[in-house]
Amino acid sequence: MYPWSLVKRVKRCWDNLKQWLSLNFPEAEATLRKGVTEDDLEELETTLNVQLPLATRLLYRFVDGQEFSSSSSSGGAADGGSLGLIGGYSVYWHKVNVYLLPIKEVIREKINIMAGDHNTISKNIVVVAVSAAPSSEKMFFLDCTNGQLYTDNKSSHQMLPCVPESLVCINGDQQQDAMLLWLEEHGRRLQTGAIKVLREQDNVKSISLFPEIPPLCSVSVTNGVQVRASSVFMPEVSNHLDKPPVYSYACSIRMSLMPTFNRRHQSSWQMYSRHWVLRADDAVIGDVDGEVVLVKNPLLHAKEEEFFCSCIFQFPTSNLSVEGFFTFVPGSLKDPKGNQFEVNVAEFPLKLPDYIF
């Protein structure tokens, strides 16, 4: 029934993901469910009146998505969870953490969608992944007819493909639907360190989709302060069909004091202001000055790990870059210990990616 080459490829995909999880995020590995039977898949297809692509069927034969319960998660699904295999991002009040649905939830989600007002969603589409966080609704839909994976804007349900169209093929000897390609690419990013498991401010671990390595992550050191900056496209709050369109990006700014740097023996530095320069096609389209609006004046301490803060940029173009600088005060704003100094934020991209997670 299944081409042997496809069976081996799907097994390799899951083996790579499981190996990485076992070494870096065993808590998430523990949520992976045992694969389903052919009878289970036939029940899904009969109930939903769809025919899953072969690669997706095989993915579920090996692993039936993820299971969340109070015993498998430090937070559990009730408060958004943090163990999603796909991971996510957090910016202001907006938190995303995406996990793979087991087929019982695929059925339930599809029934709920068809019962609601979702006229733009095809009957051949099933939900395969969702964000567990209550502060954001983010879903991924597999089109069983063409094999493409989509995500949507929550206000208008406009669909965006998550995998390059040219790679998707659900017929012939070299079948590869978008869900398989998506998981393979995600595994590659995890294994190469392009994305990592990070601890949030509440000490909860999760897979962060903010890029960690160049060229998608910039790194600069100025006056002993290292700044790493990167962005993630936010399809759930973008609207590419609007006039003008709206493309939204979550940006991560991670600051730390270099251990070998000693600025007059100060133990802390506090951010006072920021300056951004935004470019599109090498032309400056924005130049922003002002006191800090990222968070409430970040305070860096010696011997601490990175300080994380975030912001959202929204623009009518999908290919931009951002750079700038922050102004710091030695000591604190209430008790300054010296003159202000600037810390550079090297240029980093804001662009519509080939793969959307």
Image (cartoon, grey):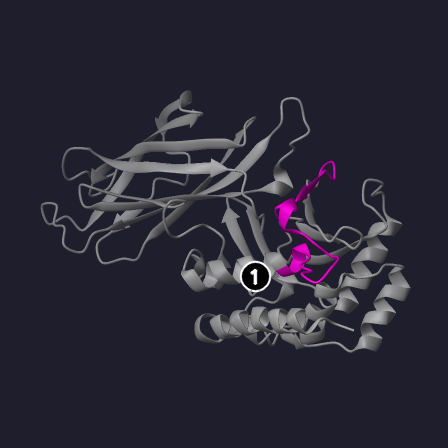
Q: Position of residue 123 (x, y in %)?
A: 86, 50
Is the stretch drawn in magenta largely helix, strand or loop?
A: loop
Q: Position of residue 128 (x, y in %)?
A: 71, 59
Is 95 left, or right, of 294 in this rendering? right
Q: Is residue 246 depicted above or below 100 in this figure?
A: above
Q: Compare residues 154 and 245 and report the one nearer the observer.
A: 245
Q: Residue furthest left?
A: 264
Q: Which residue is drawn at 58% across and 71% down?
A: 14
Would you say residue 130 is visible in this rendering?
A: no
The residue at which mark 1 appears reads as: 184
Is 80 left, or right, of 310 in this rendering? right
Is 200 left, or right, of 344 in this rendering? right
Label 1 crowd (10 A; few <14 / some 14-19 / many >=20): some
Tell me which segment is drawn in magenta: 155-180
Q: Position of residue 309 (x, y in %)?
A: 40, 45
Would you say residue 295 is visible in this rendering?
A: yes
Q: Which residue is drawn at 39% across and 40% down?
A: 296
Q: Quadrant of the N terminus?
A: bottom right
Is 322 left, or right, of 21 in this rendering? left
Question: Residue 243 occupies which quadrant of the picture?
Answer: top right
